[in-house]
C-alpha cells in the first residue's frame, strides 16, 4: 500500500463526500478508491468511515485522524513541490474561486499577469455568485466580497470595494415632477430598486452622511438577483436603480451611459478578503498569488 496516496485519497473522499468524485480526480475507478481507503483502515486497525448507499460519515476515530492527516498531507505535498522546483520556481495547479462579475471584470487580467510571471503555474478559475465550500471543491484560495461569516478559513483583508448608487442615462432623463431623481437616500423608497441577493443586507442600503453619521434605507423593486451581471443589464435596461460596486459599471459611468446618483452620500464600502483553508494557506503558490493580487489591486480605482 502506498500510504501517502491512501492518506491523500482518504482526505479527498471526506472533503468531497464521494468515492466516485475522487475516482474522477485520480482517473481511476470507484472500486480502486474504495480499496485504498479499506487498506488504510486495515493498516491503522480502525474504522474511519461509515458508508451507506446514500452518504458517508466519519467515525470518531475517523474524525480525529482526518484533522491530523489533512494537515500532514498538505505539508508533505508542499515540501515535495518545493524540492521539485529547485530554484523556487512555482509550479502546478492553483485553484481560485471568485464571483462571476468580479472574476470577469477585475480578477481576470491579474490572473493573466500572474500566469505570465510564473509559467510553471496553471490556474483553475472557478466563478460562481453563490456560496461554495472551499474544502469540498478543493479550492486553494477564494476572493470574498462582504463581511465574512465565522469559519475555520484563514482570511486576509486586502482592501475594500467602493460602491455607488447608479441608474441609466435614460432612467435619469425620464424623471418627472412627480418622481424626481433622489436627492437623499430616503427618496429611493419612491423608485424601483434592483436588489442583489448574495449580500446579507440585500435591500438595506447604507450611507455615510455629509456630516459623518450613517443612515440606512430599506428599498424595494421589481427585480432581485444573485448575479451581478443581471444587475448591470437591468440598470442598462432602465429597470430601476442599483446600489453596486463601481467596478461593475465603471466603463458605463465613464461613457455616460450610466450616472451616479446621490453624489453627496457615500455608500458603505465592502471589505475584500482572500480566504483559504488552513492546510493550504502556506503553499507557495497561494502565498505568491495573494501577494500578486494584493499589490495589483492597490491601483484598482474601484478598491481602496
Image: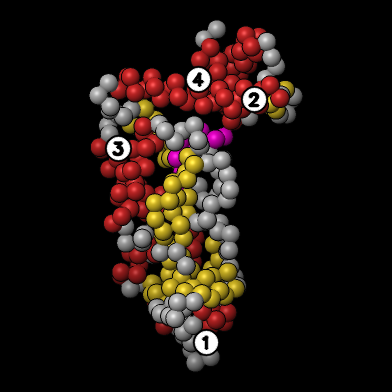
| First in sequence: mark 2 vs mark 4 | 4
Residue visible at 55% across and 59% down? Answer: 199
Left or right: where 203 falls relative to 170: right
Number of other residues with Cα within 10 Å of mark 4, as a class: few under 14, some 14 to 19, many 20 or more: few
**Helix, strand or loop under label 1:** loop
**Helix, strand or loop under label 2:** helix
| First in sequence: mark 4 vs mark 3 | 4
Give the mark toward the camera: 4 or 3: 3
Q: Where is residue 43? Give x, y as percent.
A: 62, 9
Residue visible at 34% across and 23% down? Answer: 82
Left or right: where 102 falls relative to 147: left
Name above or below for residue 174 compared with residue 133.
below
Q: Distance between the Cα atoms at labels 3 and 2?
A: 38 Å
- The prevailing secondary structure element of the residues shown in magenta is loop
Residue visible at 58% across and 59% down? Answer: 200
Say the numbered circle drawn on residue 27: 4
Give the mark toward the camera: 2 or 1: 2
Q: Where is residue 15? Give x, y as percent.
A: 58, 30
Say the numbered circle drawn on residue 179: 1
- Dot 2 corresponds to which residue? 64
Give the mark toward the camera: 2 or 4: 2
Specify whether residue 124 is painted magenta: no
Asked whether the beta carbons under mark 4 and mark 1 sit within 8 Å of each other, the answer is: no
**Helix, strand or loop under label 3:** helix
Please tell me in which quadrant of the rendered image residue 32 appears. top right
- Dot 3 corresponds to which residue? 115
Q: Where is residue 77? Give x, y as percent.
A: 43, 22
Q: Nearer the viewer, residue 98 or 64?
A: 64
Give the mark toward the camera: 3 or 2: 2
Amino acid at each position: 500500500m502506498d500510504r501517502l496516496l491512501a492518506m491523500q485519497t482518504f482526505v479527498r473522499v471526506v472533503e468531497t463526500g464521494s468515492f466516485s468524485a475522487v475516482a474522477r480526480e485520480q482517473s481511476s475507478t470507484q472500486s480502486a478508491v474504495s480499496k485504498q481507503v479499506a487498506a488504510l483502515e486495515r493498516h491503522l486497525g480502525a474504522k474511519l468511515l461509515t458508508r451507506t448507499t446514500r452518504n458517508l460519515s466519519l467515525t470518531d476515530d475517523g474524525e480525529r485522524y482526518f484533522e491530523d492527516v489533512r494537515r500532514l498531507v498538505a505539508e508533505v505535498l508542499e515540501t515535495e513541490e518545493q524540492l521539485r522546483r529547485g530554484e523556487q520556481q512555482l509550479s502546478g495547479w492553483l485553484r481560485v474561486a471568485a464571483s462571476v462579475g468580479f472574476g470577469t471584470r477585475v480578477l481576470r487580467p491579474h490572473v493573466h499577469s500572474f500566469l505570465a510571471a510564473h509559467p510553471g503555474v496553471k490556474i483553475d478559475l472557478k466563478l460562481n455568485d453563490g456560496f461554495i465550500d472551499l474544502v469540498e471543491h478543493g479550492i486553494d484560495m477564494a476572493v470574498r466580497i462582504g463581511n465574512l461569516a465565522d469559519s475555520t478559513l484563514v482570511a486576509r483583508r486586502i482592501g475594500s470595494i467602493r460602491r455607488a448608487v447608479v441608474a441609466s442615462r435614460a432612467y435619469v432623463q425620464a424623471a418627472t415632477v412627480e418622481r424626481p431623481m433622489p436627492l437623499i437616500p430616503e427618496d429611493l423608497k419612491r423608485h424601483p430598486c434592483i436588489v442583489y441577493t448574495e449580500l446579507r443586507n440585500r435591500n438595506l442600503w447604507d450611507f455615510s452622511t455629509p456630516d459623518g453619521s450613517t443612515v440606512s434605507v430599506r428599498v424595494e423593486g421589481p427585480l432581485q438577483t444573485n448575479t451581478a451581471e443581471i444587475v448591470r443589464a437591468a440598470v442598462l435596461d432602465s429597470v430601476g436603480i442599483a446600489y453596486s460596486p463601481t467596478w461593475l459599471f465603471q466603463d458605463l459611468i465613464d461613457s455616460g451611459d450610466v450616472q451616479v446618483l446621490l453624489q453627496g452620500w457615500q455608500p458603505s464600502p465592502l471589505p475584500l478578503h482572500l480566504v483559504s483553508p488552513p492546510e493550504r494557506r502556506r503553499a507557495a503558490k497561494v502565498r505568491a498569488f495573494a501577494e500578486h493580487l494584493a499589490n495589483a489591486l492597490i491601483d484598482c480605482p474601484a478598491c481602496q
